Image (tube, rainbow, N blue to C red):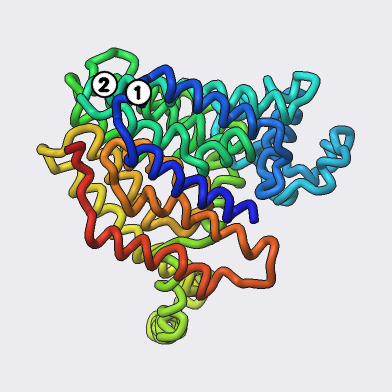
Amino acid sequence: MTIGLLAAGLAGLGVAVFGGDGARFSAGRIVWVAVLLRLLLVPLEPTLSDDVLRYVWDGRVALSGANPYALTPNADELIALRDTEWEVMPHREIEAVYPPLPLALFSIAAALPRPLLAWKILLTLVELGGCLLLLRLARSLGIELRRVALYAWNPLVTLEVAGMGHLDGIGVALAIAAVVALETRRRWGPFAAAGSVLTKLVPLVLIPIWARRAPRPVAFALLSLGLVALTLGPVAATVGGVPPGWVQFGVSWEFNGPLFEPLWRALDVMELDLAIKGGLDRLKVWSGAHDFWNRFYRFVYPQLLAKALLAPLLGWLLWRVWRDREAGVLEATGRSFAALILCSSTVYPWYVLWVLPWAALTLQRAWLVLSGLILLSYLPQFTTLPLMPWIFAAIWAPFFLLLLRHRSWSTD
């Protein structure tokens, strides 16, 4: 029922935005409605996702002086911190998977009397700042302000940020800040870009694309990457390399990837993994280096092979964006985040937020419709319906049909 109401809300949003006079959508009205929608959702319990429980836990661990990148919630060293929320917290066997910026914010929330509520309020305030910046971006590009409402009033955005408390709202707001800085030639661009990366590592691949469109490309790239390295360096030093939670997330997390899901299943039917293992067997016999070739067997399975095939596709899509000199910052950013989602093995509903600001300003219909359809991926949690094949098809088939018809990211 909730999903149906949210989908109806998205349809109503489309009617409200395009069914009347655009002059009614003043900046003040867009902001106040956005604030009201978030105020209504901030008190909600995180029933659709329990990620926020892990946020607060990692904040408490950091406040205690322990290292959440080195210790899992199940570690004996953290027994004193356990409470009733620890008992229902997800993925207690995995170390922290979030970069340092949100971890610092988790710590602030954990230090306050009602950590969950404090976190959601802090997150919502930052995300509302992103809405204000999106209004500024629309004005600077001469885009109708009512398009901003497609993001600021979007049910998916308000639900996942103010309702469920997902930290992506901060990363998206900082990405908007980076694009605004580039469009208006402000100096804070590299700082905003680095902040977005330090919220979630995904925007790292956009730094070369943003740098190419900066007034001083080399300075933009060096400063933003330098800030990221300066912040991540101490994290790597404490664990002796890449944090294990990050590795576990990158290798093991798989859910609703639009290309990944059908691809790995096709590879499984084709038994490509068995063919590769057969090749390894022959190499062992031919070379006699059994120990050397044995180490590769554990990497040969359909899901990892699908990721290996999607990686060059993603690289090609991003390279096309990078070399397209005619694409402005807004278009390049939208296309880049869209490519990341399409090639990802994991697409939770809140991941779509990274594409929505740019889809809203360019009226990219496929992604705007997806912001409603993606809510269907919550159904397996509360019903006996599996994600594959019918829920998956209901989400992605309409999306790809629309994408084939409306591929433009133009602001016209």
Q: Is residue 124 left or right of residue 186?
A: right
Quadrant of the rendering where the N terminus is positioned: bottom right
User: Could you tell me the amino acid type at mark 1?
Assistant: Leu
Q: Residue at x 29, y 36 (%)?
A: 361
Q: Residue at x 45, y 63 (%)?
A: 395
Q: Say which of 255 and 92 sits in front.
A: 255
Q: Is residue 27 left or right of residue 141?
A: right
Distance (Cα) linking label 2 and label 1:
6 Å
Q: Secondary structure at mark 1?
A: helix
Q: Residue at x 38, y 20 (%)?
A: 27
Dot 2: few (<14), some (14–19), or many (≥20) neighbours within 10 Å? few
Q: Is residue 52 left or right of residue 340?
A: right
User: Could you tell me the amino acid type at mark 2?
Assistant: Arg
Q: Quadrant of residue 96?
A: top right
Q: Which residue is mark 2?
A: 139
Q: Is residue 210 visible?
A: yes
- For residue 135, the mark is 1
Q: Give the image location of residue 192, x and y in percent.
A: 39, 22
- For residue 353, the mark is none
Instruction: Say if 90 sits above or below 13 in the image.
Output: below
